[in-house]
Amino acid sequence: MSSNQQTTTAPGRSPETNPASTPAPQQWSARQLRSRRPVLAAMICVALVGALQGVDPALHSVAMPQAAKELGMDPAAASFIKSIGTIVLAASMLGVGIVGDRHGRRKALVAGTLLMAVAAVVTATAASPLVFGLGRAMMGLATATSFAMCLAFIPTLYPREQLPKAFGLFFGAGASLIVASTALSGTIQGLFGWRATYLATAALCLVLGLAAWQLLPENRAAVLRRFDAPGVALAGAGLVALVYSIGRASALGWGHPLVLGGLGVAAVILAAFTVWELRCQHPAFPVELFRLPGFTAACLAGVLFNWADASLLGQYPALALPAGVPAAAVSVIVALMYFGMICGAPAAGLAQNRFGLSNRTMFTSGLLLCAAGLAIQVLLQNPHDLLLPAAGLFVVGFAVMWMQNPQSAVIMGSAPADQLGAVGAVKPAVGQFGFGLGFALAGPIAGIFTSGPTLTAHAYGLGLATQAAFFILAAGLVFVLLKPRPAA
């Protein structure tokens, strides 16, 4: 440790006013400690860096159609390249989490964020689909590194009882950045073209990467485990097969041999991963955490609220745009989901910190809110009516953050101190799984209620209402799963 750094471990007041009271030893520079609230500054920085996981795909979805057209991508290539970042993210999340735990979480976070900037520049300057795809693959690896370390950092800054408050700040600040960047992306692309959208992403990543280098302390696992290469490889291969198969289901259908075969391969590999981890002396991931009802319920909630998010986010534009609703109006309505997220994050922190709502109450009520946001769409009769979609998107956005806050606190609060990065990989993994399910299931379910190729308001409403019934059942399951048990 260098002479201008100090490790803080002493107990005392709140870590926001006394950095010596952080749960894990931190290496603060003398300059950082001169700040009145170094922990709060570090937390805000982590929140903004964490938001990049949402900013990049939002801007990518805006720029991708024009990029595919200009670079001459055929539909199959465009579909694969659009999702390659997600596939690489799923493959690398566990491995990069372990690397950060071993070698320094600040180093890994900064390296991942700066690599995101490089990846965005590669994508922006691509002259061929191959280079464009390389940039997106680099972005998946970089995002995995950066986001895994964001999740791992928070439990080292705040004690377990303050994690709901900390994650409220994390998701609230993050959602605000996503809304602002998404709102500006259309203007940037309209004035300067699709390449400028990726360059804007690069500039934002560069600024936040440098800020993280200045504001964050260094910390790492106190106990260094052996690197579980077989476990990391099995987890990566299984998640790739799972994410790819679900992604292809939306285009090929759930009965396609490629989809069914991929899901079968994923099930076999992930089962082998579980067996290996249970027998390994130094496992990459503590799979026994799934024996804890709270941890299992948090992961289930993560799958479900991402499912609701993706389902409504995918179905409304698919109904409105072909019906002639102006794209500007659709974007405003969709933005209400992110506004709901901005409201939901601090509300969740307040509900748990000030009013003491349990995780059981938060998850159950959040799933019922998702069901309500989906179910009210059955009343929609005209695609040009904006009130019901606006209300549904806001309610689901609010519910996402209402649950995501305690979900993150439970997952990261359950993690062993030397495996924060590894356990943090669970959150984006279940998120990608749920988001993929939402996109892949919403269309076929709505198709049950329509006879033509065009999505109608009738099919849109009944399809989402059908999913709402499932969310009600899931809320009941979580309510039972988290039933308090008498002390032994």
Image: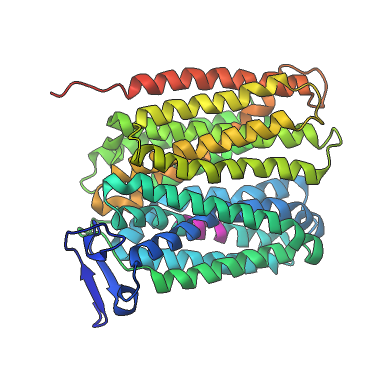
| Quadrant of res 136 | bottom right
Q: Is residue 447 magenta?
A: no
What residue is rendered at 69% in x and 28% in y? Answer: 443
What residue is rendered at 49% in x and 47% in y? Answer: 90
Is 433 drawn above or below residue 212 in the view shown?
above
Q: Position of residue 47 (x, y in %)?
A: 46, 57
Q: Position of residue 409 (x, y in %)?
A: 35, 43
- Any part of residue 131 in sight: yes
- Any part of residue 81 in sight: no
Q: Position of residue 327 (x, y in %)?
A: 80, 44
What residue is rendered at 70% in x and 28% in y? Answer: 388
Q: Is residue 143 magenta?
A: yes
**Viewer-proximal residue among 1 and 232:** 1
Residue 273 is left or right of residue 6, and the answer is right
Is 223 drawn above or below residue 2 in the view shown?
above
Q: Residue extending furthest bottom? A: 3
**Residue stretch rendered in magenta on the structure:** 138-144
Q: Residue extending furthest left? A: 488
Image quarter (top left, top right, bottom left or bottom right) of the C terminus: top left
